[in-house]
Image: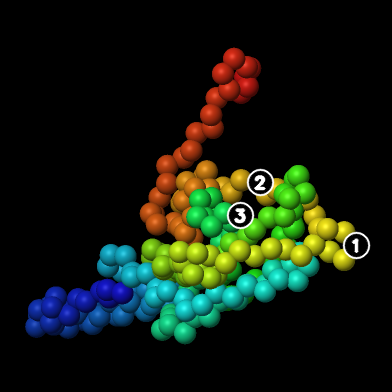
Amino acid sequence: MSLLDLSKHTQAIQVRDRETAAALRLVENAINHMAKSSGSSPIGEPSAPSPIQQLDVKVSGETAHATITDNSPLTRNIHYFLEYATEPQFLAPHIEHLGTSRGRIINLPTNGDDGTPQNYYFRAYSQYPSSKPSEKVTFGQSHAPTPVVMQGVPTNGGTNMTLLPSTGSGTAAGNGQQGGFGFGKFQNRPAVLPKRSVGTNAGR
């Protein structure tokens, strides 16, 4: 984090106007304190957090419990994100914003719509609200994520439901194909205009 430093200016002003120099030092301290407390930076963009150390996932029935281990130096405004997908490339993952928590219990269907058991893959990362996300850590090896299979419920083979397509998070694209963005990698995203239906009266 780059803090605001007005010392060169306040020292010059101190010679002719001590009260103005003192006021500027108060403003400098207030801005830097606010930046530290909010996990932001008064000058430029703060660095992304260090990667988390580990992601663990445990399954019972149709419940998955994911926990994050993060022993990195942190400031108070750290946030965590958990992503899961039904393919190991995480082409369009579903995103769970954990806030400051390092764990989440998620219910997931055992099968797709056709009754075929689904594999789930998990990864996690951290982010400050105004920084880029940290590097992603996968459950299993990064080049070979470990598949997780729900175990159904005692009375039957489990729920049949193919998940709806992901729509992403933050300032990422709304098509869900920009996983790992968290709050977003950019400050702003332009509005996404809905596609017009050709040959219909939609929107009239």
Q: Quadrant of the C terminus?
A: top right
Q: Earlier in the sequence, mark 2 or mark 3?
A: 3
- Identify the secondary structure beneath mark 1: loop
From mark 2 to mark 1, how far is it between C-alphas? 25 Å
C-alpha gap between disc 2 and disc 3: 11 Å
Left or right of 27 on screen, residue 107: right
Q: Residue at x 33, y 70 (%)?
A: 47
Image quadrant containing the N terminus: bottom left
Is 127 situated above or below 17? above
- State the image coordinates of residue 22 (x, y, percent, origin top left): 23, 82
Query: In this view of the protein, which residue sits in the foreground, 161 or 49?
Result: 161
Task: State the residue position of label 1.
Answer: 155
- How would you rate the neighbour count of disc 2 (Cα within 10 Å): few for under 14, some for 14-19, many for 20 or more? few
Label 3 to label 1: alpha-carbon separation:
24 Å
Residue drawn at (65%, 58%) of the image = 119
Image coordinates of residue 25 in percent, x first then y, are 25, 80
Residue ID at (74%, 58%): 110
Q: Which residue is mark 2?
A: 164
- Mark positioned earlier in the residue sequence (3 or 1): 3
Asked whether 121 or 99 is in front, the reply is 121
Quadrant of residue 82 in the image? bottom right
Q: Are marks 2 and 3 in contact (CB under 8 Å)?
A: no
Q: Is residue 135 visible?
A: yes
Q: Which residue is mark 3?
A: 86
- Quick one: SS at disc 2? loop
| Quarter of the image where one finds residue 43 | bottom left
